[in-house]
Image (spheres, grey):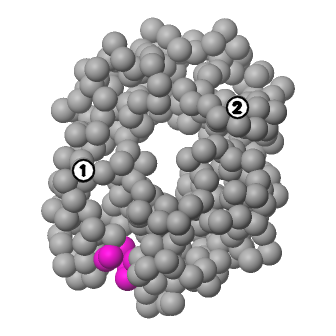
Amino acid sequence: MKLTRDNYVRTGAWLRRYARPLEMARWEYLFENGTKERVIRYLLAFQNEDGGFGHGLEPDFWLPSSSPMATWVASQILLEIGADFQDQIVQSLVSYLITTPQIVSGMWPSVLPDNNLHPHAPWWRWAEEVQGSWMYNPSVELAAFLVVWSPSESEGAELGWVSVAQAISYVMSVTSMERHEISNFRNCLSLLKPYEESFRLRTGYSFSQVAHKVQILTRDVIDQDIANWGTGYKPLPLDFIRHPDDSLYQALKPLVEHNLRFYVQQMSTEGVWDLSWSWEQYPEEFSIARRQWQGILAVERYKVFRAFGWME
């Protein structure tokens, strides 16, 4: 049931016809010996003068000015292509995070008031106290990027560690967590694995303690009702377990295998996937966002297929 060469060709053709140039550049970088510089070229189109990102980089909200959330999306792409602090695009991003005020210590605003002035999905609407539903999504991951992309003992590294410490205190105190926030914590730990001793000193917890807690939260949130996966926006195993080296893989291997088969079954004849969500308004803009998301999903799912050896 693995993906065939024909699947790959159809997906690549769809991306060339309909995807954003950014996703096409990522596809070429990941699967066709494309260059890091080409990805950066198209990612720069979404970066503002303040170093942050906007302009609908996250297709479900079209705020043109910079936001921490869109900047987080850019950070993930930069990590994907192996960017580091030597790259100007990263230096500008770090400067944006350092100079952008946090709501409370460790937490940048996840949703901005100006979101409401532009087309957006309903969950991106700003309201008073909205941060309480987002919490450390994506701040804990942004803080980890600051640590990784800043010289040690610099202002960026210090802000990153202070923010990480706040987030870790929070995660160790909760008994459940929203799926996206869990992913942020998992990605934070992946980024900070080489800094285990500093992690212990700065947070007061060992790396293994926190990793164990995050694994418990992850297992609790994954939808294990396979028959229900095709209905709605479900937290599936492959939303969290992205590689067979993941420590959860062996424990949940049958579910991961089901998820891989589910993705193959859900692929269209054109080699892409449709969305499991929609907007309640802005129908014309949503039709554009839908196409953009299909390109993103194709890139992300092929990365997973390759990681698990499901591509011929």
Image check: 18 left or right of 2? right
Residue 161 sits in which quadrant?
A: bottom left
- Total marks in image: 2
Of labels 2 and 1, earlier in sequence is: 1
- Give the magenta part as a residue range: 160-166
Q: Residue 191's spot in the image, x, y percent?
A: 41, 62
Residue 20 shown in magenta: no
| Residue 176 badge | 1
Q: Amino acid at mark 2?
A: Arg
Q: Is residue 191 left or right of residue 173?
A: right
Residue 65 coordinates in the image, percent (x, y): 75, 66
Residue 187: image location, x then y, percent: 40, 55
Residue 162 is one of the magenta-drawn residues: yes
**Residue 136: x, y in percent?**
41, 64
Q: Quadrant of the N terminus?
A: top left
Name the foreground residue: 27 vs 117.
117
Q: Amino acid at mark 1?
A: Ser
Within 10 angstroms of label 2, few (less than 14), some, or many (20 or more) residues? some
Q: Is residue 15 left or right of residue 311?
A: right
Does the residue at mark 2 contact the one at mark 1 (Cβ under 8 Å)?
Answer: no
Label 1 residue SS? loop
State which quadrant residue 271 falls in: top right
Residue 78 seen in the current view: no
**Label 2 residue SS:** helix
- What's the distance in space between the residues labelled 2 and 1, CA to CA? 30 Å
Q: Residue at left 39%, top 53%?
A: 181
Residue for point 41% across, 30% down: 234
Q: Is residue 111 above or below residue 87?
A: above
Residue where numbered disc 2 is placed: 290
The chief SS type of the magenta part is: helix
Residue drawn at (37%, 82%), measured in percent from left and top?
162
